[in-house]
Image (cartoon, rainbow, N blue to C red):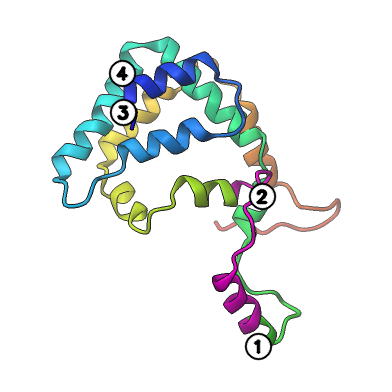
Amino acid sequence: MKSTAELLSDLAAAPESTDGRYLVELVAVLRPRRREAEVDWLDRWRQLTATLKSRPLIAAALRRHLNVVLAARMHRFLYAETGILGNEGFFSALTRRALGKLLPPAPDPRFLKDYFAELFSHPADHAWLSAIPAADWEAFITALQPEAPELAPGLQRCRRDCLMPPWPGSACSLPG
């Protein structure tokens, strides 16, 4: 397994790549190992943040890669997936879900939800991501913050897919 510095150097060489393998490898490096103390994996997270702060070209490459990956995938299915189809009966839904567990559909590289499933493939990823203190998240995001205030293409797509109605003239209700 590569180190964080090696991954960031590889990413800096190809920030326009849309396959997202760099982020998958980066999450795998940051992910806590079995029975690893919290201070050890938090130290890796803080080391990543310190590297991004001290090397602005690496931070710009990671930011560009995140934007390219977000812009290249469809967000709508990630935000709208409930697992329940409105016109589906109980037994057909049960059959669809059971068959989906036995033979899951192939991941589609066009969908952000499939990329997130690949990126956060470990069952305990939610636990360690939520255990990162808010101050560390803020420091990480500050290290990635773009120089210009305009939205990046990936964030523009996210905003468009989340806030714009899927068809003209439709109403959208946002939680308020």
Label 4, on which residue?
Answer: 51
| Vertical placement of residue 79 versus 134, above or below | below
Measured in 3D between alpha carbons, the distance from the residue under mark 4 to the one under mark 3, in whole angstroms, is 12 Å
Residue type at the position of mark 4: Thr
Q: Which mark is first along the chain, 3 or 1? A: 1
Which is more foreground, mark 4 or mark 2?
2
Q: Which mark is first along the chain, 3 or 2? A: 2
Q: Which mark is first along the chain, 3 or 4? A: 4
Tell me the SS state at disc 4. Answer: helix
Q: Which residue is drawn at 58% across and 28% down?
A: 67
Label 3, on which residue?
Answer: 139
Check if residue 156 falls in the magenta segment: no
Measured in 3D between alpha carbons, the distance from the residue under mark 4 to the one under mark 2, in whole angstroms, is 33 Å
Residue 90 bears which disc, if any? 1
Q: How crowded is mark 4: few (under 14 residues within 10 Å), some or many (20 or more)?
A: some
Residue type at the position of mark 1: Phe
**Closest to the observer, 167 or 172:** 167
Q: Position of residue 81 (x, y in %)?
A: 62, 62
Label 2, on which residue?
Answer: 108
Q: Which residue is drawn at 76% across and 79% down?
A: 87
Say which quadrant the C terminus sits in. bottom right
Check if residue 98 falls in the magenta segment: yes
